[in-house]
Image: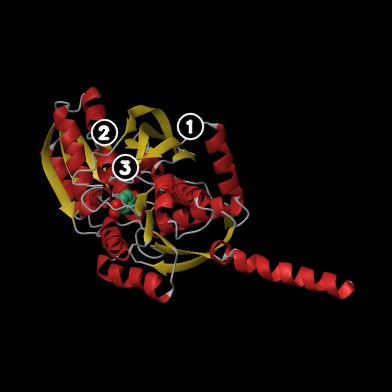
């Protein structure tokens, strides 16, 4: 009898893992993010946010323990294809989460389309990712470059600013944000009188600041982020320009950077899909847990990472953790309503968030919410055929 019972228990113990081999194996998440360079802090915030959500679920999504493989993409488009192929071919990841830089992310999206690997973009705004290059296995939990800057044009006109200069790094993100701003600004009756650029990730702004001073616009639109945004906002104020030509931009200009920008950033208006002072129970709980876990205040990048994990969890849950059921998983993700710290958002057919764009103003070390610049704004997804 005793022997019989032991055998039964042993057989049951053996059978259980076999029956669920597919859905109980570890889930391998490939994090392709910048760990060095001007966007390094953004990569850290995204990784922290992603891991925080997984940790809040007990380290498992749909019953599968999550394991991470990381690669530093250095925000270098020239290395992007090799880096993403390492994760897919060498590490055999189940899903790729990345990245910050639009140029790198476009290379990732190309490989994801070709190989069918699931990709969740937790920052990079390249319009094509959920536009001409859209694919059933490609999702974004951040924004499109168009979405980040389109609504700002109307804000400037309402504040009496009719002539603006734009200044950005010369690459997809800068080009597309400046173009979206111009589109919204000119539609509202404004005029972009000069478009200035410098190569990514240069921070030698002096000659361009002199040009802005000589042009004397009513306002300047700027896209920079991370270390570059800190230096630009400080240089702009040091040149005295903030006193006469107010600075505006998508919120990346002042997000995660205010401690370092200090006095130079005070009063700047920006638009973004996240803000300080939302004061919702969801955001308060997220901020508290993030601060406790990492001894840091969260920013928009942390939220986007957190929501990448939430979106993945929704897909996995729909198929009981079985990644081979791709159609059902992607359908659940496309139909998701994400209970984000930023506020609830949905996913468009093209795979991009449909979300509120806040108007914020810098007060002390906060990007304080002062209104909603665009309600439930959807990217036009130009060129997406899905
Ligand atoms: C981008 O390259 O798409 C990008 C980078 C940093 C940001 C926003 C967008 O903060």
> Mark 1: few, some, or many residues within 10 Å (few <14, many ≥20)?
some
Which of label 2 and label 3 is nearer to you? 3
Which of 280/296 is in front? Answer: 280
Image label count: 3
* Separation (CA) of disc 1 from disc 3: 28 Å
Precedes in sequence: disc 1 or disc 3: 1
In the rendering, which numbered label is found on residue 349? 3
Position of residue 340 measured from the top left corner of the image (x, y, whole percent): 48, 40
Which of 282/332 is in front? Answer: 332
> Mark 3: few, some, or many residues within 10 Å (few <14, many ≥20)?
many
Residue sitting at 30 percent across and 62 percent down?
A: 108
Q: Is residue 42 left or right of residue 198?
A: right
Marks 2 and 3 in Cβ contact (< 8 Å):
no
Could you say whether the residue bearing mark 2 is in a helix, strand or loop?
A: helix
* Separation (CA) of disc 2 from disc 3: 25 Å
| Quarter of the N terminus within the rendering | bottom right
Could you say whether the residue bearing mark 3 is in a helix, strand or loop?
A: loop
Residue that badge 1 annotates: 278
Q: Is residue 123 left or right of residue 184?
A: right
Outermost residue on the right side: it is 1
In the rendering, which numbered label is found on residue 152? 2
Quarter of the view holding residue 344: top left
């Amino acid at each position: 009898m005793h022997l019989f019972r032991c055998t039964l228990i042993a057989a049951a113990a053996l059978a259980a893992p076999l029956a669920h081999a597919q859905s109980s194996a570890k889930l391998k998440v490939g994090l392709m993010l910048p760990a060095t360079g001007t966007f390094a802090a953004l990569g850290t915030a995204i990784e922290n946010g992603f891991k925080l959500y997984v940790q809040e679920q007990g380290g498992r999504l749909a019953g599968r323990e999550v394991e991470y493989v990381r690669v530093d993409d250095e925000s270098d488009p020239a290395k992007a294809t090799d880096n993403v192929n390492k994760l897919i071919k060498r590490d055999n990841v189940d899903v790729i989460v990345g990245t910050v830089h639009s140029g790198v992310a476009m290379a990732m999206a190309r490989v994801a389309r070709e190989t069918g690997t699931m990709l969740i973009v937790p920052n990079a705004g390249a319009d094509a990712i959920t536009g001409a290059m859209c694919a059933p296995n490609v999702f974004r939990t951040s924004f499109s470059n168009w979405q980040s800057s389109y609504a700002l044009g109307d804000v400037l006109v309402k504040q009496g600013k009719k002539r603006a200069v734009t200044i950005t790094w010369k690459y997809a993100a800068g080009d597309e944000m400046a173009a979206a701003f111009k589109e919204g600004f000119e539609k509202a009756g404004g005029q972009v009188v000069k478009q200035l650029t410098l190569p990514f990730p240069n921070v030698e702004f002096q000659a361009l600041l002199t040009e802005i001073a000589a042009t004397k616009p009513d306002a300047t639109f700027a896209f920079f982020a991370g270390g570059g945004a800190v230096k630009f906002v400080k240089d702009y104020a040091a040149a005295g320009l903030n006193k006469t030509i107010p600075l505006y931009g998508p919120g990346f200009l002042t997000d995660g950077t205010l401690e370092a920008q200090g006095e130079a950033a005070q009063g700047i208006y920006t638009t973004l899909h996240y803000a300080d002072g939302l004061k919702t129970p969801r955001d308060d709980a997220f901020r508290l847990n993030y601060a406790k876990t990492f001894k840091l205040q969260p920013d928009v990048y942390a939220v986007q990472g957190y929501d990448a994990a939430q979106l993945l969890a929704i897909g996995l849950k729909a198929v009981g953790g079985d990644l081979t059921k791709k159609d059902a998983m992607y359908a659940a993700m496309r139909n998701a309503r994400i209970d984000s710290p930023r506020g609830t958002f949905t996913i468009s057919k093209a795979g991009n968030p449909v979300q509120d764009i806040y108007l914020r103003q810098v007060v002390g070390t906060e990007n304080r919410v002062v209104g909603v610049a665009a309600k439930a704004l959807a990217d036009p997804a130009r060129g997406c055929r899905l």
